[in-house]
Image (spheres, rainbow, N blue to C red):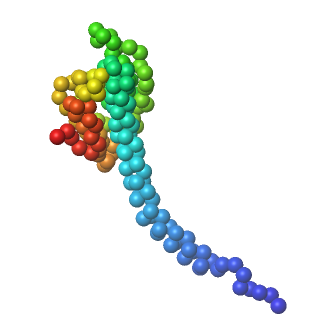
Amino acid sequence: MRDRNKGFTLVELMVTISVLAITLSFAIPAFTSSINKAKADTEIGDLYRAFNYARLEAINRAVNVRVTPSTAGSWTSSLNIQTVAAGAAVLPAIRAVPAMATSATIAAGPPAYIEFNNLGALSSPATAVAFAYTRGAEARSMGVCLTGRLILGGACP
């Protein structure tokens, strides 16, 4: 006696593939959106960590430390963290931070460089700085206060 009930019928396979295709059509856009959010969080977090590292190095070394974009005025390019010797001579970089994605932008307005003094406060510029990061539909903000405090997702009080 032969058992003819083994395996799947063509109709069962077609229904399964159809359900899978419908499920994927909803899941893929949501997955892409979550990837873009994660990339935006990572890039603004890298900028935050670069400033925090520079501030802590200024305190530890008891000298001014400067964060400068490698391309003048473009904070999305790679960043150089350098100590500043007496007499405003800039020494070689102590750390380099890689550039952000090509689709990321930081709104015009940030200064040519950010410098922290030996107390961790903002030495240059003389006012608080706000960074407005945009990558596609994702936007983030970060503030650098006169005290050297870094604020993700907001501006200085």
Q: Can you name the residue that lies furthest to the top here? A: 87
- At a point 17% along the width and 40% down the height, the residue shown is 157
117 versus 155 height, above or below: above
- At a point 21% along the width and 41% down the height, the residue shown is 155
Q: How many marks?
A: 0
Instruction: Tell me which corner region of the image, top left, top right, bottom left or bottom right, holds residue 28.
Output: bottom left
Residue 70 can be seen in this image: no
- Nearer-the-camera pick, 89 or 41: 89
Instruction: Tell me which corner region of the image, top left, top right, bottom left or bottom right, holds residue 25.
Output: bottom left
20 versus 57 height, above or below: below
- Nearer-the-camera pick, 119 or 26: 119
Residue 153 can be seen in this image: yes
- At a point 29% along the width and 28% down the height, the residue shown is 120
107 versus 4 height, above or below: above
State the quadrant of the N terminus. bottom right
20 relative position to 85: left or right: right
Residue 72, image x, y percentages: 31, 22
Residue 5, image x, y percentages: 71, 85
- Nearer-the-camera pick, 33 or 46: 46
Q: Can you name the residue that lies furthest to the bottom here? A: 1
- At a point 25% along the width and 28% down the height, the residue shown is 121
- Nearer-the-camera pick, 109 or 28: 109
Instruction: Tell me which corner region of the image, top left, top right, bottom left or bottom right, holds residue 89.
Output: top left
Residue 133, image x, y percentages: 29, 40
Residue 24, image x, y percentages: 48, 64
